[in-house]
Image (cartoon, rainbow, N blue to C red):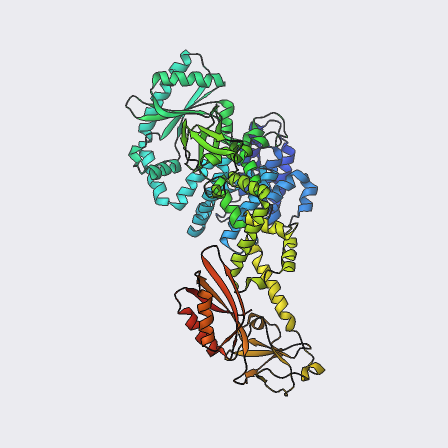
Amino acid sequence: MATDFKEEFIKLKKEILANDKDADIDLIKKAYDFAELKHRGQKRNSGEDYFIHPIAVARTLCEMGLDDDTICAGLMHDILEDTDVTYEQMEELFGKRITFLVDGVTKLKNLKVRSKEEKQAEYMRKMVMAMTKDVRVILIKLADRLHNMRTLEYKTKEKQIKTATETLEIYVPIAHRLGIYTIKWELEDLCLRYKEPEVYYELAEMVNKKRAEREEYINKIIEKIKEVLDEANIEYTVNGRPKSLYSIYKKMYKQNIEFDQIYDLTAVRIIVKTIADCYNVLGRVHAIWKPVPNRIKDYIGQPKSNGYKSIHTTVFGKDGAPFEIQIRTEDMHKEAEYGIAAHWKYKEGKNKSDKFDHKLTIIRQILDIRQENGDKIDDKEFMKKLKDDIFADEIYVYSPRGDLYSLPSGSCSIDFAYRIHTDVGNSCIGAKVSGRIVPIDQKLKNGDVVEILTSKNSSGPSRDWLNIVRSNQAKTKIKQYFKKNEKEKNIEIGREILIRDIKKVSNNYKSLMKTQWLDDISEKLAFASTEDMFASIGFGSTNTSQIIPKLKQKYEEEAKKDLIEVDLNHDSQKKRPKNGVRVRDFDEDIEVKFAKCCNPVPGDKIIGYITRGRGISVHLRNCPNITSLNSPSRLIDVYWENENTDRFPVTIEISVIEEIGQFGEISKIIKNEGINISRMEAKSNDDGTASMELTLDVKNTEELVDVIKKIQEEDFVIDVYRKKG
């Protein structure tokens, strides 16, 4: 049966005007008709007309009290993605603001990525960018996801689990941080339904069985509250709020308790006119029921970081069972239900988006993350910071003056110091928690009163703090300190880190650490100099994985300069001897030389490459510069044909436990084998080891293998290997 969209608009119009009597119905009707026309003929998995979905999104945005532009964008949020309408056409019809919102939602979907991990990171990056530009894009996306979750039953089991998991990991935390609890709670319950269906339906059945009993119990409490507040002439509304199934599930899981041990299945909520009434009601409630110690939370005096305000108190009922009472004003209640959206619904004026950005802590936190290292921050690190800081569980602690601060769970006093001010963190020398001096790495708990001890003579933060702090705000400030104050030291540290990491992938780090190459790479990475690049590595903002592949590429390009197409008739090809190598199908006078990139010696499997003006270059058959060639027609067979008196240079590197006399022992072993040492370099390392690099003149690979084995037999030798570069 086809949907009557004229009737659907009448219903939507009624809801819109109930929330905003001044709404621009003509503009909304224009968007409604346009979207219905463009989606006409499209179907959802349920078999319904597709346009049912945009209507549902617009209805949720209306319930949240959002403005006309946002409702129009909700109606058209899939137009740019699913129809032939262009950005320019929509902008001409509906203006820049609405088109910007629609395009913002569209960009969240169009991801060109390779892996699941990369998709999640890129998606979150786009969510963050959209939120920093106009948070309404995210509100539309939340409404979109809510309706998709409500209709998830029409998807496959695999798709249900995937969508529910994504919703729980991304959309629920965002709804929480934006304070939109009505959407957060429903999304959580829907996620539980599809991720843990047996648990969901079992809990639903148990809650349903207790409903009548709980309703009778709560109704008696409500009647008592009404009686007391009526006597005090306080204007109020009071009702019971059932606990969500997901909240019950989390409580059972975290506290390892059974369902029958949960007493606060329903909370009582009292809504009054003024803040003074809130505290008046709190006193009268405590006069009736005894409060549970340490369970009074005053989020009016100290609001949560997302703006949530209310008083929560848990009291003992007549039968000794505890229950929770929430007390708030009407404005607080509206903001608790709709979070940031309430700033459109309940504030005067139409253009409100610039009036609340300063209240949105999440925006400032996310901007800190994005600005820590510009756009160079990679996806894995970006996701880690988001999950560790923005989406982490929170704790609430107090300053000695009673100011409330939120921190990621697991934070310590150093996190708190940097949360107050950068200078407080940099000059921190200790901390008191609830009046007692504690180690600065001790984890803080909800309700702790934290006092930071500072000193003008402080030497600044320790690098070890980076492994202690939990908040990325603190990590960023600590890194900035070292970046500013210890540049010279960071340059040296960064250089050492780069050399260390190059050694992991190359036997000869010196061949990669060429000044010109490093200068070129630092310029491409937008550093003012190579030293700035080293410093960035030293204080942890740049990873060597951004540099080493580029150095290897330059090395390979340099090595290939000898492997270019050739003129075989050039006179210079017919002058030099063959150096112990016979070349197939060429006369005696062809020039032959050994490639420096792999240094072949007799016994190695070799191949020749015809070069321009330089005869034939001999390489190992597995040399990377040969295996990566695009012109195999230039390869030629070559064979060893050396005299017994011929010698070939080969370099070995030896790592040893540093002791007196080792170099002499190794030299003795080599000379006893009748092998000449033409070059030797040695250096001590900070870890108690030493490294030696020796160039030996050997007859063939057998002689080389024999001497390496004899060196390896010495107890002080850690490793010996042949260098091929």
Q: Residue at x 45, y 72 (%)?
A: 668
Residue 70 drawn at (x, y percent): 60, 36
Identify which residue, 686 or 431, lies in the foreground. 686
Identify which residue, 345 or 309, lies in the foreground. 309
Residue 78 drawn at (x, y percent): 58, 45
Q: Is residue 651 visible?
A: yes
Residue 567 placement: quadrant: bottom right
Q: Is residue 110 visible?
A: no
> From what the image shows, is residue 288 above or below residue 162?
above
> From what the image shows, is residue 171 above or below residue 511?
above
Residue 154 drawn at (x, y percent): 45, 48
Residue that sits furthest to the left in the current view = 319
Residue 287 drawn at (x, y percent): 36, 16
> From what the image shows, is residue 659 above or below residue 77?
below
Image side of residue 528 versus residue 259, left or right: right
Quadrant (top left/top right/bottom left/bottom right) for the C terminus: bottom right
Q: Residue at x 70, y 81 (%)?
A: 572
How many dots with numbers? 0
Identify which residue, 598 or 68, lies in the foreground. 598
Q: Residue at x 66, y 48 (%)?
A: 86
